[in-house]
Amino acid sequence: MKLTRSLLPVLALLVTSAAPSTFAAKEVPNFMLLDDAGKAHEFHRADGKVAVLFFTGVGCPIARKSAPKLQAMQQKFGKDVSIWVIDSEAPGDIPAVQKEKTELGFANVPVLMDTHQALALALGIDRTAEVVAVDTKEWNVIYRGAIDDQLAEGAEKPAPEHTYLQDAITSFLAGQPVATPSTAAKGCLITFEKSAAAADTPISYTKQVAPLLREKCVSCHRDGEIGPFAFSSYAVAKRKARMMEEVLLTQRMPPWSADPHYGQFVDAPTLTAAETQMLLRWVEQGAPPDADAGKDPLTEPLPPLEEWPLGKPDYVIKLPHPEEIPATGTLDYRHIRIDSPVTEDVWLGATVVKPGNRKVVHHAIVYAQFPGARSEEVFRGVKIAGWAPGRNLVKLPEGTGVFLGKNAKIEIEIHYTTNGTPQTDDTEIGLYVLKEKPALAYRTGMAIKLAFQIPPYEEESPTSANYTFKRDSMLYTLTPHMHVRGSRMSYEAIFPDGKREMLLSVPRYDFNWQTSYRLTQPRFIPAGTKIICSGAFDNSTKNPFNPDPSKSVHWGQQSWDEMFIGYLGYAEVQPPAATGQPSPAPAGGAGN
Protein backbone atom coordinates (compact mmCIF):
# COMPACT_ATOMS: atom_id res chain seq x y z
CA MET A 1 0.00 0.00 0.00
CA LYS A 2 1.01 3.58 -0.53
CA LEU A 3 -0.35 6.25 1.70
CA THR A 4 0.60 10.40 2.88
CA ARG A 5 1.80 14.75 5.16
CA SER A 6 1.71 18.04 3.34
CA LEU A 7 4.64 20.46 2.99
CA LEU A 8 2.64 23.56 2.15
CA PRO A 9 1.81 25.99 4.94
CA VAL A 10 -1.19 24.87 6.98
CA LEU A 11 -4.42 25.81 5.25
CA ALA A 12 -7.22 27.39 7.21
CA LEU A 13 -10.11 26.28 5.07
CA LEU A 14 -13.82 26.95 5.06
CA VAL A 15 -16.32 27.67 7.79
CA THR A 16 -18.51 24.81 6.74
CA SER A 17 -19.16 21.24 7.69
CA ALA A 18 -18.67 20.12 4.12
CA ALA A 19 -16.22 20.94 1.38
CA PRO A 20 -17.63 22.12 -1.93
CA SER A 21 -18.62 19.13 -4.01
CA THR A 22 -18.22 20.76 -7.39
CA PHE A 23 -15.33 18.54 -8.50
CA ALA A 24 -16.38 17.00 -11.77
CA ALA A 25 -13.13 16.86 -13.70
CA LYS A 26 -12.25 13.52 -15.20
CA GLU A 27 -8.53 14.02 -14.61
CA VAL A 28 -7.12 14.05 -11.07
CA PRO A 29 -4.37 16.65 -10.74
CA ASN A 30 -0.94 15.64 -9.56
CA PHE A 31 -0.17 16.27 -5.90
CA MET A 32 2.53 15.63 -3.31
CA LEU A 33 1.98 14.83 0.35
CA LEU A 34 4.15 13.65 3.22
CA ASP A 35 3.28 10.50 5.11
CA ASP A 36 3.16 10.11 8.88
CA ALA A 37 6.90 9.27 8.87
CA GLY A 38 7.84 12.38 6.87
CA LYS A 39 8.42 10.68 3.50
CA ALA A 40 7.25 12.42 0.32
CA HIS A 41 4.79 10.75 -2.06
CA GLU A 42 3.95 12.18 -5.50
CA PHE A 43 0.72 10.90 -7.01
CA HIS A 44 1.84 10.74 -10.63
CA ARG A 45 4.52 8.26 -9.58
CA ALA A 46 1.98 5.78 -8.22
CA ASP A 47 2.54 2.09 -8.95
CA GLY A 48 0.00 -0.18 -10.60
CA LYS A 49 -2.62 0.34 -13.26
CA VAL A 50 -5.13 1.83 -10.80
CA ALA A 51 -4.48 4.09 -7.83
CA VAL A 52 -7.18 4.28 -5.16
CA LEU A 53 -7.36 7.36 -2.93
CA PHE A 54 -9.11 6.55 0.33
CA PHE A 55 -9.93 9.51 2.57
CA THR A 56 -9.94 8.76 6.27
CA GLY A 57 -10.22 10.45 9.65
CA VAL A 58 -9.12 9.40 13.12
CA GLY A 59 -11.97 7.78 15.02
CA CYS A 60 -14.48 7.58 12.15
CA PRO A 61 -16.27 4.20 12.58
CA ILE A 62 -16.90 3.77 8.86
CA ALA A 63 -13.30 4.56 7.97
CA ARG A 64 -12.04 2.14 10.65
CA LYS A 65 -14.31 -0.67 9.45
CA SER A 66 -13.16 -0.03 5.89
CA ALA A 67 -9.54 -0.88 6.73
CA PRO A 68 -9.96 -4.67 6.29
CA LYS A 69 -11.74 -4.03 3.00
CA LEU A 70 -8.74 -2.09 1.72
CA GLN A 71 -6.35 -4.82 2.82
CA ALA A 72 -8.48 -7.45 1.07
CA MET A 73 -8.60 -5.25 -2.04
CA GLN A 74 -4.81 -5.01 -2.08
CA GLN A 75 -4.44 -8.78 -1.73
CA LYS A 76 -6.97 -9.43 -4.49
CA PHE A 77 -5.46 -7.13 -7.13
CA GLY A 78 -1.81 -7.22 -6.09
CA LYS A 79 0.55 -5.03 -8.09
CA ASP A 80 -2.21 -3.85 -10.42
CA VAL A 81 -3.58 -1.56 -7.71
CA SER A 82 -1.94 0.85 -5.27
CA ILE A 83 -3.95 2.24 -2.38
CA TRP A 84 -3.22 5.69 -0.94
CA VAL A 85 -4.79 6.32 2.48
CA ILE A 86 -5.16 10.07 3.07
CA ASP A 87 -6.07 11.80 6.31
CA SER A 88 -7.72 15.16 5.62
CA GLU A 89 -9.54 15.44 8.94
CA ALA A 90 -6.76 15.45 11.60
CA PRO A 91 -3.65 15.85 9.44
CA GLY A 92 -1.72 17.73 12.13
CA ASP A 93 -2.16 15.06 14.80
CA ILE A 94 0.58 12.65 13.76
CA PRO A 95 0.59 10.62 17.02
CA ALA A 96 -3.17 10.00 16.76
CA VAL A 97 -2.86 8.90 13.14
CA GLN A 98 0.02 6.56 13.94
CA LYS A 99 -1.82 5.06 16.91
CA GLU A 100 -4.92 4.34 14.86
CA LYS A 101 -3.09 2.83 11.90
CA THR A 102 -1.29 0.47 14.31
CA GLU A 103 -4.60 -0.58 15.84
CA LEU A 104 -5.98 -1.28 12.36
CA GLY A 105 -3.04 -3.44 11.34
CA PHE A 106 -1.35 -0.83 9.15
CA ALA A 107 1.74 -0.48 11.37
CA ASN A 108 4.10 -0.66 8.41
CA VAL A 109 1.89 1.33 6.03
CA PRO A 110 2.27 5.11 5.75
CA VAL A 111 -0.77 7.36 5.95
CA LEU A 112 -0.62 10.46 3.79
CA MET A 113 -1.28 13.68 5.67
CA ASP A 114 -3.37 16.27 3.82
CA THR A 115 -2.12 18.88 6.27
CA HIS A 116 -3.75 21.83 4.53
CA GLN A 117 -6.86 19.93 3.52
CA ALA A 118 -5.93 21.19 0.07
CA LEU A 119 -6.39 17.86 -1.69
CA ALA A 120 -9.81 17.31 -0.12
CA LEU A 121 -10.75 20.82 -1.23
CA ALA A 122 -9.48 20.32 -4.78
CA LEU A 123 -11.37 17.04 -5.18
CA GLY A 124 -14.50 18.20 -3.34
CA ILE A 125 -14.22 15.51 -0.67
CA ASP A 126 -16.64 16.20 2.20
CA ARG A 127 -16.83 12.79 3.91
CA THR A 128 -14.34 10.22 5.08
CA ALA A 129 -14.40 6.71 3.57
CA GLU A 130 -14.80 8.16 0.08
CA VAL A 131 -12.64 6.53 -2.58
CA VAL A 132 -11.43 7.94 -5.87
CA ALA A 133 -10.09 5.27 -8.24
CA VAL A 134 -7.80 6.60 -10.95
CA ASP A 135 -6.37 5.17 -14.16
CA THR A 136 -2.60 5.73 -13.75
CA LYS A 137 -2.01 5.94 -17.49
CA GLU A 138 -4.36 8.82 -18.26
CA TRP A 139 -5.01 9.92 -14.64
CA ASN A 140 -8.75 9.82 -15.26
CA VAL A 141 -11.29 8.88 -12.59
CA ILE A 142 -12.81 5.45 -13.25
CA TYR A 143 -14.89 5.33 -10.06
CA ARG A 144 -15.75 7.61 -7.17
CA GLY A 145 -17.84 7.02 -4.05
CA ALA A 146 -18.26 4.29 -1.40
CA ILE A 147 -16.25 1.06 -1.30
CA ASP A 148 -19.53 -0.87 -1.15
CA ASP A 149 -23.04 -0.52 0.28
CA GLN A 150 -22.50 -2.32 3.60
CA LEU A 151 -21.68 0.68 5.78
CA ALA A 152 -23.61 3.91 6.26
CA GLU A 153 -23.89 6.67 8.84
CA GLY A 154 -25.10 4.89 11.98
CA ALA A 155 -26.05 1.69 10.14
CA GLU A 156 -24.47 -1.51 8.87
CA LYS A 157 -25.70 -4.46 6.77
CA PRO A 158 -24.54 -8.01 7.54
CA ALA A 159 -22.78 -8.05 4.18
CA PRO A 160 -22.56 -5.80 1.13
CA GLU A 161 -24.97 -6.32 -1.74
CA HIS A 162 -22.90 -4.26 -4.17
CA THR A 163 -19.09 -4.13 -4.20
CA TYR A 164 -18.78 -0.92 -6.20
CA LEU A 165 -15.03 -0.33 -6.01
CA GLN A 166 -14.05 -3.95 -6.60
CA ASP A 167 -16.44 -4.24 -9.56
CA ALA A 168 -15.16 -0.99 -11.08
CA ILE A 169 -11.52 -2.08 -10.85
CA THR A 170 -12.31 -5.54 -12.20
CA SER A 171 -14.13 -4.09 -15.21
CA PHE A 172 -11.40 -1.55 -15.90
CA LEU A 173 -8.59 -4.11 -15.77
CA ALA A 174 -10.59 -6.32 -18.14
CA GLY A 175 -10.97 -3.43 -20.58
CA GLN A 176 -14.71 -3.21 -20.04
CA PRO A 177 -16.89 -0.17 -19.22
CA VAL A 178 -17.48 0.54 -15.52
CA ALA A 179 -21.18 -0.04 -14.91
CA THR A 180 -21.47 2.23 -11.85
CA PRO A 181 -18.86 5.03 -12.09
CA SER A 182 -20.07 6.94 -9.02
CA THR A 183 -22.01 6.51 -5.79
CA ALA A 184 -22.58 8.57 -2.65
CA ALA A 185 -19.94 8.29 0.06
CA LYS A 186 -21.24 7.28 3.49
CA GLY A 187 -18.46 8.34 5.85
CA CYS A 188 -18.14 10.99 8.53
CA LEU A 189 -18.44 14.62 7.54
CA ILE A 190 -15.08 16.41 7.46
CA THR A 191 -14.95 19.71 9.32
CA PHE A 192 -12.87 22.27 7.48
CA GLU A 193 -11.10 25.02 9.30
CA LYS A 194 -12.57 28.49 9.20
CA SER A 195 -11.45 30.86 6.48
CA ALA A 196 -12.09 34.58 6.04
CA ALA A 197 -15.18 33.94 3.95
CA ALA A 198 -17.83 31.29 3.41
CA ALA A 199 -17.17 28.56 0.89
CA ASP A 200 -19.53 29.97 -1.73
CA THR A 201 -18.32 33.57 -1.45
CA PRO A 202 -16.78 34.79 -4.74
CA ILE A 203 -13.07 35.48 -4.50
CA SER A 204 -12.08 38.99 -5.59
CA TYR A 205 -9.22 39.17 -8.07
CA THR A 206 -8.43 42.84 -7.47
CA LYS A 207 -8.86 42.79 -3.68
CA GLN A 208 -7.53 39.33 -2.79
CA VAL A 209 -5.73 37.44 -5.56
CA ALA A 210 -3.70 40.16 -7.27
CA PRO A 211 -2.43 41.77 -4.03
CA LEU A 212 -1.31 38.34 -2.80
CA LEU A 213 0.47 37.50 -6.06
CA ARG A 214 2.18 40.88 -5.98
CA GLU A 215 3.29 40.44 -2.37
CA LYS A 216 4.40 36.79 -2.45
CA CYS A 217 5.12 35.84 -6.08
CA VAL A 218 6.11 38.87 -8.14
CA SER A 219 9.56 39.18 -6.57
CA CYS A 220 10.57 36.15 -8.68
CA HIS A 221 7.85 36.27 -11.35
CA ARG A 222 8.83 39.59 -12.94
CA ASP A 223 10.96 40.67 -15.87
CA GLY A 224 14.65 40.15 -15.15
CA GLU A 225 14.12 37.67 -12.33
CA ILE A 226 14.28 33.90 -12.07
CA GLY A 227 10.57 33.15 -12.65
CA PRO A 228 9.83 31.73 -16.13
CA PHE A 229 7.02 34.25 -16.65
CA ALA A 230 5.95 37.56 -15.14
CA PHE A 231 2.70 38.04 -13.20
CA SER A 232 2.12 41.33 -14.98
CA SER A 233 -1.67 41.41 -15.49
CA TYR A 234 -4.96 39.64 -14.88
CA ALA A 235 -4.62 38.00 -18.30
CA VAL A 236 -1.42 36.27 -17.20
CA ALA A 237 -2.88 35.19 -13.85
CA LYS A 238 -5.93 33.79 -15.67
CA ARG A 239 -3.75 31.82 -18.11
CA LYS A 240 -1.69 30.40 -15.26
CA ALA A 241 -4.61 29.60 -12.94
CA ARG A 242 -4.62 25.82 -13.44
CA MET A 243 -0.84 25.70 -13.16
CA MET A 244 -1.21 27.67 -9.94
CA GLU A 245 -3.45 24.93 -8.59
CA GLU A 246 -1.02 22.21 -9.69
CA VAL A 247 2.09 23.76 -8.15
CA LEU A 248 0.23 24.32 -4.88
CA LEU A 249 -1.01 20.71 -4.74
CA THR A 250 2.37 19.28 -5.74
CA GLN A 251 4.08 21.75 -3.38
CA ARG A 252 6.53 22.92 -6.02
CA MET A 253 5.52 26.46 -5.12
CA PRO A 254 6.30 28.23 -2.94
CA PRO A 255 9.83 26.77 -3.39
CA TRP A 256 10.41 25.50 0.13
CA SER A 257 11.05 21.84 0.85
CA ALA A 258 11.64 21.62 4.61
CA ASP A 259 9.30 19.42 6.61
CA PRO A 260 7.56 21.93 8.92
CA HIS A 261 7.61 19.45 11.81
CA TYR A 262 11.36 19.91 12.29
CA GLY A 263 13.08 23.21 12.99
CA GLN A 264 12.20 26.83 12.36
CA PHE A 265 13.98 28.79 9.66
CA VAL A 266 14.40 32.40 8.63
CA ASP A 267 12.54 33.81 5.62
CA ALA A 268 10.68 30.62 4.73
CA PRO A 269 8.82 31.60 1.51
CA THR A 270 5.48 30.10 2.45
CA LEU A 271 1.83 31.09 2.18
CA THR A 272 -0.51 31.17 5.12
CA ALA A 273 -3.40 28.76 5.38
CA ALA A 274 -6.02 31.28 4.32
CA GLU A 275 -3.87 32.51 1.41
CA THR A 276 -3.44 29.04 -0.09
CA GLN A 277 -7.12 28.29 0.45
CA MET A 278 -8.13 31.50 -1.27
CA LEU A 279 -6.01 30.85 -4.38
CA LEU A 280 -7.37 27.31 -4.76
CA ARG A 281 -10.95 28.54 -4.44
CA TRP A 282 -10.38 31.30 -7.01
CA VAL A 283 -9.08 28.70 -9.47
CA GLU A 284 -12.04 26.43 -8.70
CA GLN A 285 -14.42 29.33 -9.43
CA GLY A 286 -12.89 29.70 -12.89
CA ALA A 287 -10.38 32.46 -12.09
CA PRO A 288 -12.93 35.22 -12.80
CA PRO A 289 -12.22 38.95 -12.90
CA ASP A 290 -14.30 41.19 -10.68
CA ALA A 291 -17.62 42.35 -12.13
CA ASP A 292 -16.79 45.92 -11.14
CA ALA A 293 -13.04 45.56 -11.60
CA GLY A 294 -11.05 48.71 -11.16
CA LYS A 295 -7.36 49.12 -11.87
CA ASP A 296 -5.45 45.84 -12.12
CA PRO A 297 -2.94 45.71 -9.20
CA LEU A 298 -0.57 43.55 -11.26
CA THR A 299 -0.15 46.32 -13.83
CA GLU A 300 1.04 48.81 -11.22
CA PRO A 301 4.71 49.77 -11.77
CA LEU A 302 7.23 47.81 -9.72
CA PRO A 303 10.26 49.33 -8.01
CA PRO A 304 13.38 48.84 -10.14
CA LEU A 305 15.52 45.79 -9.45
CA GLU A 306 18.43 46.64 -7.19
CA GLU A 307 21.85 46.05 -8.67
CA TRP A 308 23.15 45.09 -5.22
CA PRO A 309 20.30 44.18 -2.82
CA LEU A 310 22.61 44.42 0.22
CA GLY A 311 23.83 47.87 -0.80
CA LYS A 312 26.94 48.95 -2.67
CA PRO A 313 29.84 46.58 -1.93
CA ASP A 314 33.17 47.80 -0.59
CA TYR A 315 34.93 45.92 -3.37
CA VAL A 316 33.68 44.44 -6.65
CA ILE A 317 35.54 41.57 -8.32
CA LYS A 318 35.00 41.37 -12.07
CA LEU A 319 35.84 38.54 -14.44
CA PRO A 320 38.98 39.17 -16.51
CA HIS A 321 36.77 39.14 -19.62
CA PRO A 322 33.20 38.11 -20.47
CA GLU A 323 32.86 34.33 -20.57
CA GLU A 324 31.64 32.86 -23.85
CA ILE A 325 29.01 30.12 -23.61
CA PRO A 326 28.22 28.08 -26.75
CA ALA A 327 24.69 27.38 -27.93
CA THR A 328 24.78 23.65 -27.20
CA GLY A 329 26.90 21.04 -25.55
CA THR A 330 28.01 19.95 -22.11
CA LEU A 331 30.42 22.30 -20.38
CA ASP A 332 33.07 21.51 -17.79
CA TYR A 333 33.32 23.63 -14.67
CA ARG A 334 35.38 26.76 -15.21
CA HIS A 335 37.89 27.82 -12.56
CA ILE A 336 38.75 31.48 -12.96
CA ARG A 337 41.60 32.86 -10.84
CA ILE A 338 41.73 36.57 -10.02
CA ASP A 339 43.89 38.66 -7.71
CA SER A 340 41.93 39.99 -4.74
CA PRO A 341 41.43 43.76 -4.82
CA VAL A 342 41.88 43.82 -1.01
CA THR A 343 45.49 44.56 -0.06
CA GLU A 344 45.10 44.20 3.71
CA ASP A 345 43.69 41.65 6.15
CA VAL A 346 39.93 42.13 6.53
CA TRP A 347 36.83 40.41 7.85
CA LEU A 348 33.87 40.00 5.52
CA GLY A 349 30.28 40.35 6.69
CA ALA A 350 28.91 39.21 3.33
CA THR A 351 30.07 38.14 -0.10
CA VAL A 352 27.53 38.30 -2.91
CA VAL A 353 27.67 36.61 -6.30
CA LYS A 354 25.78 38.63 -8.90
CA PRO A 355 25.21 36.39 -11.94
CA GLY A 356 25.69 38.28 -15.16
CA ASN A 357 23.47 35.97 -17.20
CA ARG A 358 20.97 33.87 -15.25
CA LYS A 359 19.95 32.05 -18.40
CA VAL A 360 23.21 30.09 -18.36
CA VAL A 361 24.82 30.47 -14.91
CA HIS A 362 24.00 27.22 -13.14
CA HIS A 363 26.00 27.94 -10.00
CA ALA A 364 29.08 29.78 -8.78
CA ILE A 365 31.33 29.22 -5.75
CA VAL A 366 34.04 31.63 -4.61
CA TYR A 367 37.17 30.54 -2.73
CA ALA A 368 40.03 32.57 -1.27
CA GLN A 369 43.61 31.33 -0.98
CA PHE A 370 46.21 33.06 1.18
CA PRO A 371 48.90 32.05 3.69
CA GLY A 372 47.27 30.22 6.58
CA ALA A 373 43.95 29.82 4.75
CA ARG A 374 41.83 26.95 5.99
CA SER A 375 40.97 24.54 3.18
CA GLU A 376 37.28 23.90 3.65
CA GLU A 377 36.34 22.18 0.42
CA VAL A 378 38.40 20.11 -1.99
CA PHE A 379 41.49 22.04 -0.81
CA ARG A 380 40.59 25.12 -2.79
CA GLY A 381 40.86 27.43 0.21
CA VAL A 382 38.32 29.30 2.28
CA LYS A 383 34.83 29.28 0.80
CA ILE A 384 33.59 32.87 0.97
CA ALA A 385 30.48 32.78 -1.24
CA GLY A 386 28.17 30.60 -3.26
CA TRP A 387 25.22 31.18 -5.54
CA ALA A 388 22.61 28.91 -7.10
CA PRO A 389 18.94 29.38 -8.00
CA GLY A 390 16.92 29.88 -4.84
CA ARG A 391 19.84 31.03 -2.70
CA ASN A 392 18.91 34.09 -0.67
CA LEU A 393 21.29 37.04 -0.58
CA VAL A 394 21.88 37.66 3.12
CA LYS A 395 24.58 38.91 5.40
CA LEU A 396 26.40 36.51 7.69
CA PRO A 397 24.84 36.08 11.16
CA GLU A 398 25.30 39.01 13.53
CA GLY A 399 28.68 38.93 15.28
CA THR A 400 30.32 36.62 12.75
CA GLY A 401 32.56 37.12 9.76
CA VAL A 402 34.89 35.36 7.32
CA PHE A 403 38.58 36.26 7.40
CA LEU A 404 40.13 37.30 4.07
CA GLY A 405 43.92 37.57 4.06
CA LYS A 406 45.64 40.38 2.20
CA ASN A 407 46.53 39.97 -1.46
CA ALA A 408 44.60 36.69 -1.66
CA LYS A 409 44.06 34.70 -4.79
CA ILE A 410 40.35 34.43 -5.60
CA GLU A 411 39.10 31.37 -7.44
CA ILE A 412 35.61 31.46 -8.93
CA GLU A 413 34.15 28.10 -9.87
CA ILE A 414 31.35 28.66 -12.40
CA HIS A 415 29.20 26.03 -13.99
CA TYR A 416 27.46 27.12 -17.18
CA THR A 417 24.64 25.32 -19.00
CA THR A 418 23.74 25.93 -22.62
CA ASN A 419 20.28 27.15 -23.70
CA GLY A 420 20.25 26.83 -27.50
CA THR A 421 21.80 30.16 -28.45
CA PRO A 422 25.32 31.57 -27.88
CA GLN A 423 25.54 33.59 -24.68
CA THR A 424 28.03 35.68 -22.71
CA ASP A 425 28.36 36.17 -18.97
CA ASP A 426 30.01 38.85 -16.86
CA THR A 427 29.29 37.66 -13.30
CA GLU A 428 30.57 39.93 -10.51
CA ILE A 429 31.46 39.34 -6.87
CA GLY A 430 30.68 41.95 -4.20
CA LEU A 431 32.72 42.02 -0.96
CA TYR A 432 31.27 43.65 2.17
CA VAL A 433 33.95 44.46 4.75
CA LEU A 434 33.18 44.63 8.47
CA LYS A 435 34.33 47.76 10.26
CA GLU A 436 35.46 45.75 13.27
CA LYS A 437 36.81 42.28 13.89
CA PRO A 438 33.81 40.06 14.68
CA ALA A 439 33.45 38.07 17.87
CA LEU A 440 33.16 34.77 15.96
CA ALA A 441 34.72 33.33 12.83
CA TYR A 442 32.04 31.92 10.51
CA ARG A 443 33.02 28.58 9.03
CA THR A 444 31.64 26.02 6.62
CA GLY A 445 31.71 22.36 7.59
CA MET A 446 30.77 19.40 5.43
CA ALA A 447 29.27 16.01 6.06
CA ILE A 448 30.48 14.55 2.78
CA LYS A 449 30.32 11.11 1.15
CA LEU A 450 32.72 10.58 -1.75
CA ALA A 451 32.56 6.82 -2.17
CA PHE A 452 29.14 5.55 -3.21
CA GLN A 453 27.55 3.70 -6.09
CA ILE A 454 23.96 4.15 -7.24
CA PRO A 455 22.77 1.01 -9.08
CA PRO A 456 20.86 1.31 -12.36
CA TYR A 457 17.08 1.65 -12.02
CA GLU A 458 17.33 1.89 -8.22
CA GLU A 459 14.44 3.96 -6.86
CA GLU A 460 15.72 4.24 -3.29
CA SER A 461 19.52 4.14 -3.01
CA PRO A 462 20.36 5.32 0.52
CA THR A 463 23.59 6.89 1.75
CA SER A 464 24.80 8.94 4.69
CA ALA A 465 27.67 11.11 5.87
CA ASN A 466 28.77 12.38 9.29
CA TYR A 467 30.33 15.53 10.70
CA THR A 468 31.58 15.79 14.30
CA PHE A 469 32.04 19.13 16.05
CA LYS A 470 35.44 19.21 17.73
CA ARG A 471 34.65 22.34 19.75
CA ASP A 472 31.57 23.98 21.22
CA SER A 473 29.90 25.86 18.38
CA MET A 474 26.91 27.90 17.32
CA LEU A 475 25.10 26.38 14.34
CA TYR A 476 23.44 28.81 11.93
CA THR A 477 22.76 27.26 8.54
CA LEU A 478 22.11 23.85 6.95
CA THR A 479 22.48 23.41 3.19
CA PRO A 480 21.84 20.01 1.55
CA HIS A 481 23.53 19.43 -1.80
CA MET A 482 22.97 16.62 -4.31
CA HIS A 483 22.41 16.51 -8.06
CA VAL A 484 19.47 15.46 -10.24
CA ARG A 485 19.14 11.97 -8.73
CA GLY A 486 19.06 13.32 -5.18
CA SER A 487 15.67 12.60 -3.61
CA ARG A 488 15.92 13.43 0.11
CA MET A 489 18.29 14.50 2.89
CA SER A 490 17.98 15.07 6.62
CA TYR A 491 20.26 16.37 9.39
CA GLU A 492 20.08 14.57 12.75
CA ALA A 493 22.19 15.58 15.75
CA ILE A 494 23.45 13.02 18.25
CA PHE A 495 24.58 14.91 21.34
CA PRO A 496 27.31 13.76 23.73
CA ASP A 497 24.68 12.65 26.27
CA GLY A 498 23.13 10.34 23.66
CA LYS A 499 20.06 12.43 22.93
CA ARG A 500 19.02 12.67 19.27
CA GLU A 501 17.23 15.50 17.48
CA MET A 502 16.18 16.03 13.89
CA LEU A 503 17.40 19.48 12.91
CA LEU A 504 16.17 19.50 9.30
CA SER A 505 14.33 17.12 7.01
CA VAL A 506 14.00 17.73 3.28
CA PRO A 507 11.72 14.86 2.15
CA ARG A 508 11.75 15.91 -1.51
CA TYR A 509 15.08 17.38 -2.56
CA ASP A 510 14.90 19.60 -5.66
CA PHE A 511 18.14 20.21 -7.54
CA ASN A 512 16.61 23.31 -9.13
CA TRP A 513 16.51 25.07 -5.75
CA GLN A 514 19.80 25.06 -3.83
CA THR A 515 18.22 26.24 -0.61
CA SER A 516 20.13 27.22 2.51
CA TYR A 517 18.07 26.78 5.68
CA ARG A 518 19.09 29.36 8.30
CA LEU A 519 17.87 28.61 11.80
CA THR A 520 15.57 31.25 13.29
CA GLN A 521 17.53 30.90 16.54
CA PRO A 522 21.20 29.86 16.27
CA ARG A 523 21.68 26.50 17.97
CA PHE A 524 24.40 25.78 20.54
CA ILE A 525 26.19 22.55 19.61
CA PRO A 526 28.45 21.08 22.31
CA ALA A 527 31.81 19.59 21.38
CA GLY A 528 31.52 15.93 20.42
CA THR A 529 28.10 16.29 18.79
CA LYS A 530 27.78 14.18 15.65
CA ILE A 531 25.64 15.35 12.74
CA ILE A 532 24.33 12.49 10.61
CA CYS A 533 23.17 13.48 7.13
CA SER A 534 20.98 10.70 5.77
CA GLY A 535 19.57 10.70 2.28
CA ALA A 536 18.82 8.77 -0.85
CA PHE A 537 19.10 8.88 -4.61
CA ASP A 538 16.43 7.96 -7.16
CA ASN A 539 17.96 6.43 -10.29
CA SER A 540 14.66 5.01 -11.53
CA THR A 541 12.56 5.78 -14.57
CA LYS A 542 10.08 7.52 -12.24
CA ASN A 543 12.54 10.34 -11.61
CA PRO A 544 11.64 12.96 -14.25
CA PHE A 545 15.10 14.60 -13.92
CA ASN A 546 17.01 11.35 -14.48
CA PRO A 547 19.14 11.59 -17.64
CA ASP A 548 19.90 7.85 -17.85
CA PRO A 549 18.44 5.32 -15.38
CA SER A 550 20.49 2.52 -16.95
CA LYS A 551 23.73 4.10 -15.73
CA SER A 552 25.57 3.20 -12.53
CA VAL A 553 26.30 6.56 -10.91
CA HIS A 554 29.24 7.70 -8.78
CA TRP A 555 30.65 10.96 -7.38
CA GLY A 556 31.33 13.59 -10.03
CA GLN A 557 31.07 17.29 -10.78
CA GLN A 558 28.57 17.23 -13.63
CA SER A 559 24.88 17.25 -12.83
CA TRP A 560 24.43 13.74 -14.31
CA ASP A 561 27.05 12.52 -11.83
CA GLU A 562 26.20 12.78 -8.14
CA MET A 563 27.30 14.44 -4.94
CA PHE A 564 26.27 14.03 -1.33
CA ILE A 565 27.22 16.98 0.87
CA GLY A 566 25.54 18.33 3.97
CA TYR A 567 26.97 21.82 4.47
CA LEU A 568 26.91 23.35 7.94
CA GLY A 569 27.45 27.05 8.65
CA TYR A 570 28.76 27.50 12.17
CA ALA A 571 31.14 29.36 14.49
CA GLU A 572 33.19 27.93 17.34
CA VAL A 573 32.53 29.38 20.83
CA GLN A 574 33.66 29.01 24.43
CA PRO A 575 31.88 26.42 26.64
CA PRO A 576 28.51 27.65 27.96
CA ALA A 577 28.56 29.79 31.09
CA ALA A 578 26.64 28.92 34.23
CA THR A 579 23.50 30.36 32.66
CA GLY A 580 23.69 27.73 29.93
CA GLN A 581 24.34 30.35 27.26
CA PRO A 582 27.54 30.09 25.23
CA SER A 583 30.02 32.94 25.37
CA PRO A 584 31.90 33.95 22.24
CA ALA A 585 35.40 32.74 21.52
CA PRO A 586 37.60 35.43 19.99
CA ALA A 587 37.88 35.18 16.24
CA GLY A 588 41.48 34.70 15.26
CA GLY A 589 43.35 34.45 11.99
CA ALA A 590 41.82 32.22 9.41
CA GLY A 591 40.88 29.47 11.82
CA ASN A 592 42.38 26.01 11.96
Image (tube, rainbow, N blue to C red):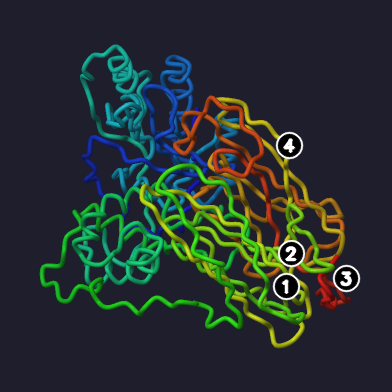
- Mark 4 residue crowding within 10 angstroms, few (<14) / some (14–19) / many (20+): few
Q: CA distance from mark 1 to mark 2?
A: 9 Å
Q: Amino acid at mark 3?
A: Pro
Q: In this figure, what is the number of numbered marks?
A: 4
Q: Earlier in the sequence, mark 4 or mark 2?
A: 2
**Does 166 sit above or below residue 340?**
above
Does residue 158 appear to the left or right of 497 in the view shown? left
Q: CA distance from mark 2 to mark 3?
A: 25 Å
Q: Secondary structure at mark 1?
A: strand
Mark 4 or 3, closer to the camera: 4
**Does 473 sit above or below residue 148?**
below
To which residue does mark 2 refer?
382
- In the rendered image, residue 564, in percent from the top left (x then y), is placed at 66, 44
- Mark 3 residue crowding within 10 angstroms, few (<14) / some (14–19) / many (20+): some
Q: CA distance from mark 4 to mark 3?
A: 35 Å
Q: Residue at the front extreme?
A: 321
- In the rendered image, residue 84, in percent from the top left (x then y), is placed at 44, 33
**Does 187 sit above or below residue 243?**
above
Look at the image and tell me in which quarter the C terminus lies: bottom right
Circle 2/circle 3 CB separation < 8 Å: no
- Mark 2 residue crowding within 10 angstroms, few (<14) / some (14–19) / many (20+): many
Circle 1/circle 2 CB separation < 8 Å: yes
Residue at image point 24% right, 74% down? 297
Circle 4/circle 3 CB separation < 8 Å: no
Q: Secondary structure at mark 4?
A: loop
Q: Which mark is residue 451?
A: 4
- Mark 1 residue crowding within 10 angstroms, few (<14) / some (14–19) / many (20+): many
* Residue 394 found in image quarter: bottom right
